[in-house]
Image (cartoon, helix red, strand yellow):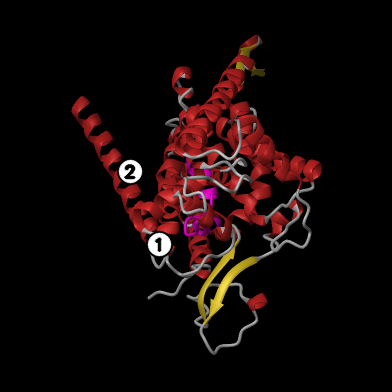
Amino acid sequence: MVRWVYAVKFEERRAELMFLLLLFVISFGLRVYKIEVPNRLIGDEVYYVPAARSILGQNDAGVPQDPRLAHPPLGKMMIALGMFLFGDNPFGWRILSAVAGSLLIPVSYLVAKRLASGRKELNNMAYLASFVMAFETLGFYFSRVARLDIFMMLFFLAGVFFLLDVKPKRRLVAAPFFAASFLAKEAAAIMILPVLLYSALRMDEIKGGKAVKRIKLHFDIKQFALLAILSGLAVLVLWYILEWVILTPTRANIVDRILVMIRRLDIDNPAAVGRSQIWMWFFNQPVTRAAAVIPGVRIDFTTVVVGPLLNPNLQYAYIIQPSWTLILPMVPGMIYMMLNFVKEPVARFSFLYWFGVLTGWIVINVVFRGLVYLFYVLTFVPAVVFAISYFLSRRLYEESRTKSVKWFGITLLFVIAHLANFVALYPVPIP
């Protein structure tokens, strides 16, 4: 009997590994395929690639230095590492983004696995979450360009994986990963705070008369304070090592450096390309693009809504928006999570993470009147992915005990629609 149990577990583990390996290989191949197209800087690459060159010592002073103080240095240093390893060319600029974006998929699987906590009704949650993350179009875009956001997301979700550990001491390992996420891009703070709040929430069951149970909400302030303090200390230590030990600093101390970064938030440039209002995020607006047409072909770029696979007149087309398969069910999905907030840990995590991030952006937009872009939706994409995967997994399990195939059909249609959205926006022609 024991041997049979171990054999079943081995087969299950092998199936998991094969699924993840296959998904990772396919995802990495799609991310790295023609990553050198276009062979020029696009979007915010015009800021980060020159900064990476300076980090490699290509500046007037001839020393490794980060000249762009709007963001911490780690993300730019990751781009510089790719250039150091593979050269100052489009492949070198972008390759580590592709690696980070591909690693995000198994990390998402592991986070979903911990959220599921071994519950039978959530057996499919991790599979669905990693699959959806693999073919999500906004994350895919950041996996193919030399920008900071994909590194921020990878380190953040790695931190969440440790934060969800059942043993409190092992949760402390989340702190250096959250620090790395913040130092890749400071917007990570908006994600870190809600998940720290989640980690400190406790739902205690109180038995009443005749086995009646009540659930009491309890907030563990010590747990929250400990993780927040450790994450803050990790930021300071790692930042000091990166900018005052590895690089040549441009500021005398960390306090002055942080103040420079904060002052940048008070930007107000209504004419900026891609500027968005937060309410527009729920409609994938405004659409921003980086595209080029076949020489000799005339096309109105404002009409470009698909990539070269469906529009052969395009050399490439990066349409920068999250998948419609996440945007459309987002609000009803989060309402469902809110209604199940008390009794379901996954619902509690997804809603608190999503609502906290959304609230954070609203506060920043109101207080600083700064630039807000549609691509900031990336910061709460994982919350939506976990919510959808949780919902579908539960429905599939409930249906498995009946003769109905309704939710199997709905899940299949969702997967097909998600893949179709991805194919429609794939940025370069094949072959």
Q: Residues within 10 Å of mark 2 (few under 14, many from 20)?
A: some
- In the image, is residue 317 part of the stretch drawn in magenta? no
The disc labelled 1 sits on which kind of residue? Phe
Report helix, strand or loop for mark 1.
helix
Magenta span of residues: 138-154
**Percent position (x, y) of residue 342?**
64, 28
- Observer-nearest of 77 and 358: 77
Q: Position of residue 155 (x, y in %)?
A: 48, 39
Q: Which disc is residue 174 wearing?
A: none
Determine which quarter of the picture holds residue 217.
top right
* Residue under pointer 2: 16
Q: Nearer the viewer, mark 2 or mark 1?
A: 1
| 197 and 40: which is toward the camera | 40
Q: Exactly how many numbered labels are in the figure?
A: 2
Q: Earlier in the sequence, mark 2 or mark 1?
A: 2
Q: Which residue is mark 1?
A: 91
The location of residue 396, given as percent across then percent down, is 48, 46
